Amino acid sequence: MALVLLGGRFFTRRTDVKRVMTAIQPYCSSVASGRQHVNGVDLYYEQTGRGKHAVLLFPGALGCTRTDFGPQLKSLNKERFTVVGWDPRGYGHSRPPDRDFPPDFFERDAKDAVDLMKALGFGKFSLLGWSDGGITALIAAAKNPDLIRKMVVWGSNAFVSQQDLELYTAVRDVSKWSARMRQPMEEVYGAKVFAETWEAWGDGIAQFAKRPEGSICLELLPLISCPTLIIHGEKDPMVPSFHPQRLLKHIKGSRLHLMPEGKHNLHLRYADEFNQLVEEFLKD
């Protein structure tokens, strides 16, 4: 779940499916942006870089490319990588539709993500997934082994425990958040829609606790065959340390990197260290 975010001011101009070059944010001097019709919805995406290695960024709950991945869009090596950020259906600029959380919402997001990359012409690509986006990336990698080169996930979990439910309940009421924490999401959704969608997310994630072992995607982890790097901030208040350990145990050949001072948003707070770690891991 994406709790601490970097807000960016949104532009409301619509673009067609064609990629258009524009200088719209200080984080990136040139970015291709557009909407691609995928599985019945128009998915918003941004693309930067010209490298042969394509990388797809998966945002956290209610997050989108501009709130969640500014330092990665700005600073990941543009000669080596082509970086694509996207807004999952119902999030950010991929609205309409309004966001909902049926039992298969992670699987739906995973299929949308893979089909978006196919539609944009990418044959094989790597995944960077944060929080809920990491869960989606795990599912995408498990179900599409021939398409995924490598994967990095952080702040993610493959099951929901009782401890997790307590953490989610503690942050359910956004009126109790600080204004600084609410602002990026309220700029995207407006205060009312943000509060309603966040509560709906809370109900959506809680439904997994009723499954055996609280599984979101535990049964899929052994199917992941791509090289996988799990990053965990040891001061993450939202993801207990047993989650990355569970991923490490069940994803064959994966490795775990601990960031002692890292919290949930470690890729934003320690962007230079994070980006260097990712670039090194993604080397061919």
Image (spheres, grey):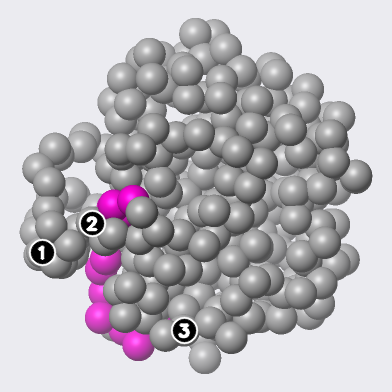
| Residue 118 covered by magenta stretch | no
Do we see residue 197 in this rendering?
Answer: yes
Q: Which residue is mark 2?
A: 35
Say which quarter of the image contains residue 257. Answer: bottom right
| Three-letter residue code for mark 1 | Val
Do we see residue 65 in this rendering?
Answer: no
Task: Tell me what residue is drawn at x 45 percent, y 59 percent.
Answer: 112
Instruction: Compare residues 245 and 147 and report the one nearer the observer.
Output: 147
Q: Which residue is mark 1?
A: 20
Q: CA distance from mark 3 to mark 1?
A: 23 Å
Q: Which residue is mark 3?
A: 124
Image side of residue 54 versus residue 259, left or right: left
Q: Position of residue 196 (x, y in %)?
A: 47, 18
Question: SS class of the residue under badge 3?
Answer: loop
Question: SS class of the residue under badge 2?
Answer: strand
Task: Tell me what residue is drawn at x 56 percent, y 25 percent.
Answer: 200
Instruction: Compare residues 95 and 69 and report the one nearer the observer.
Output: 95
Image side of residue 264 versus residue 216, left or right: left
Q: Position of residue 94 (x, y in %)?
A: 32, 45
Question: For the stretch drawn in magenta, what is the main secondary structure?
Answer: strand
Q: Residue furthest front?
A: 40
> Dot 2 surroundings within 10 Å: few (below 14), some, or many (20 or more)?
many
Q: Nearer the viewer, mark 1 or mark 2?
A: 2
| Three-letter residue code for mark 3 | Lys
Say which quarter of the image contains residue 73. Answer: bottom left
Q: Please provide the residue range marked out in magenta.
A: 41-53
Upstream in the sequence, badge 3 or badge 2?
A: 2
Upstream in the sequence, badge 1 or badge 2?
A: 1
Q: CA distance from mark 3 to mark 2?
A: 21 Å
Say which quarter of the image contains residue 167. Answer: top right
> Dot 3 surroundings within 10 Å: few (below 14), some, or many (20 or more)?
some
